[in-house]
Amino acid sequence: MIPPGLHAVLAILALLPAAPDRDEIIVADFEGETYLPWVAEGEAFGVGPARGALPGQMGVSGFLGRGLVNSFVGGDDSTGTLTSPPIRVERPFLNFLIGGGKYPGENCLDLVVDGATVRTATGPNDRPGGSERLDWASWDVSALVGKEAVLRVVDRRTGGWGHITVDQIVQSDRPRGVVPAAFDLAADARYLHLPIREDAPIRRVRVAVDGTVAREFDIKLAAGQPAYSAFLDLSPFASKRLRIEADLPAGSGALGEISRSNEVPDAGGLYREAGRPQFHFTSRRGWLNDPNGLVWHDGEYHLFYQHNPYGWDWGNMHWGHAVSKDLVRWAELPIALYPRRYDDWCFSGSAVVDDANTSGFGEGGAPMVLAYTSTGRGECIAFSRDRGRTWSEYPGNPVIRHQGRDPRLLRLPASGKWAMAVYDEGGGGKAIAFYSSPDLKAWTYESKIDGFYECPDLFELPVEGEPGRSLWVLSGADGEYILGRFDGRTFAPEPGRHRTWHGDFYAAQTFSNEPNGRRVQIGWARGIAFPGMPFNQQMTVPCELTLRPTGDGVRMFARPVVELDGLRSGGKAWRDLDLGPEARPLDGAEGDLLDIRIAAEVGTAGKFTLRIPGAAITYDAGRRTIACAGFTAPLSPSGGTVTLRILADRRSVEVFGDNGRVALSGARARTQGGRPEPPTIEGEGVRIRSIEVDKLGSTWK
Ligand code: FRU
């Protein structure tokens, strides 16, 4: 579909200088042995142009010919300047290749006229990672034609990305770098389709409504042959005129590839993609990380999540949203929280139902209230009166300003008050701070506990088998937890730090207001990636948490919720197998999606390995470990026996040992298509009491 606004793009192109035919003037191509007639001062530039990457530098690409300016001489910490002789500005554009650090005034190429810097440019990098590629940039210098100017490459910056690269400075009648492009359209369809290619440069796109920017995000916008399309929901702007703007290379067709439709892109193929997990939550499109705002309300479980709707990588943080009646089958809803501005993203947080309407946000019903970190403001709250379908910001936001993030709200049943556990790095420490509030709006700082990083969770659980006894659990993003008592103001810990989860597991959170009184947890299976798919990252399966006494003291157990059992079919079982070194196929149990339960007598030294296509799970009684997908976790046999439950989805495996005392999440390697091979099992010193294998169905059907 070609947007009617394409004409506007063409109109903008028509504004460019007509029929340029003069030769370009090469100011410098840095192909010589020395910089002459340019003059280098300091150490950063060395005595002459570099020939690509310098020692210790990532591969440098994008420069022309053999030589370029590269201020990485001696590494990032060297500084200096490189200055041209005076040049006369003779063309309306100055084009050049530039890369390296993005530190205006410190790492830059400057154009200096009469002693004043009149134009400046930097590379694209201001955080770890990034690329050493040089890209074209252009300055419109038409107002300076006839003047004398000096070019100066500056490196005053030390530390990461404290260097700059420059090449091929050319005077021209046409710009080579990016120029503003735009088109207008009516929001007369539900979705804008945004074509993406992973190898396309990142562009900043703005969507303006009535002259005000309503959405602004980074996207690898494809100028043709997209790998897939992301989408932007236009319903908030229904029947308005929109202007889509981006800085693009002159003549780029990228905006012309944007189209409109009432369906999301490839709606027919949704959830049928070859790599799509079938019983783990993934987003229709784009990236996800932390689960956010887990809450049950009025018949629905809500799963919000950290979400980049416009790409496969982390960035553009929104709150995605899905609902489920059974924790297993999820329906995706429109995005719940959009960043207010490009530089004010919606980081992690939590949600509660304010039954007593302490907040006053409710009107004839209990409002849902969420807390999230606005990266530009602090901890903020928002409420919904329509079952989470739309959210309004509390006008008094932010409710807490501090150096921290990831607010976890909870109600204290005894007092009816609210508490918040929130990551706090003020003063340089890594801590969880506790706040209290009567109404979710006014918060009072109470105390802090050191030694945790990001995404706290805090809840109370009964200790099974010990009537009347309960303990509080406090966890950080990596899954480590402590037990203790919490009185709404301070956490009094018992000795010891513990963990149930190992492997690809991060930033887990439990549901508030779970209707059956369960503590149900979902984590982000951080690290499980989906190359070639229009989405990336998955959640772990929902698990019920319990506290149970063990020989080592009380510990938290995690077991997949019973609702998952409803996906089982075609069960097969084997009993009383003595294992040997030869792999024994479990014929008839082949499948992509498996639920395997094993009870094995392993004594003190038995060892066995279960193999499914793309993964191996090894239990070693001698070492008292379970290993899978490159991760190893401690697991002791009890009474010479070990039990395992294994859930295998298309790209992941979760292993639950000893009824969930230990849980492990990892990636499953991709295997050749075709009919899956049956699982096999081999071992020594092991008698299998039983293996039960069920195939699991898809939750998307
Ligand atoms: C944890 C985290 C949070 C933050 C969010 C941003 O994975 O870094 O601390 O709120 O992700 O996406």
Image: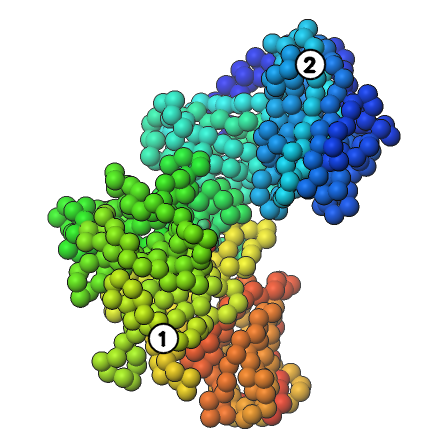
The local crowd at label 1, few if under 14, some if 14 to 19, many if 20 or more residues have their Cα within 10 Å, is: few
* Whole-percent x, y for residue 613 in the image: 60, 70
* Whole-percent x, y for residue 347 in the image: 41, 48
Label 1's element?
loop
Spatial separation of the CA atoms under disc 1 and disc 2: 70 Å
Question: Looking at the image, can residue 551 be seen?
Answer: yes
The type of residue carrying mark 1 is: Glu
Query: Which dot marks residue 158?
Result: none
* Residue at the far top in the pictured view: 146
- In the picture of the structure, the residue carrying the numbered disc 2 is 149
| Nearer-the-camera pick, 290 or 148 | 148
- In the picture of the structure, the residue carrying the numbered disc 1 is 494
Residue at (44% x, 35% y) in the render: 342
Left or right of 14 in this view: 437 = left
Residue at (39% x, 83% y) in the render: 553
| Nearer-the-camera pick, 293 or 301 | 293
Q: Place residue 68 in its image quadrant.
A: top right
Q: Place residue 455 in its image quadrant.
A: bottom left
* Residue at the far left in the pictured view: 364
The type of residue carrying mark 2 is: Ala
Left or right of 634 in this view: 71 = right
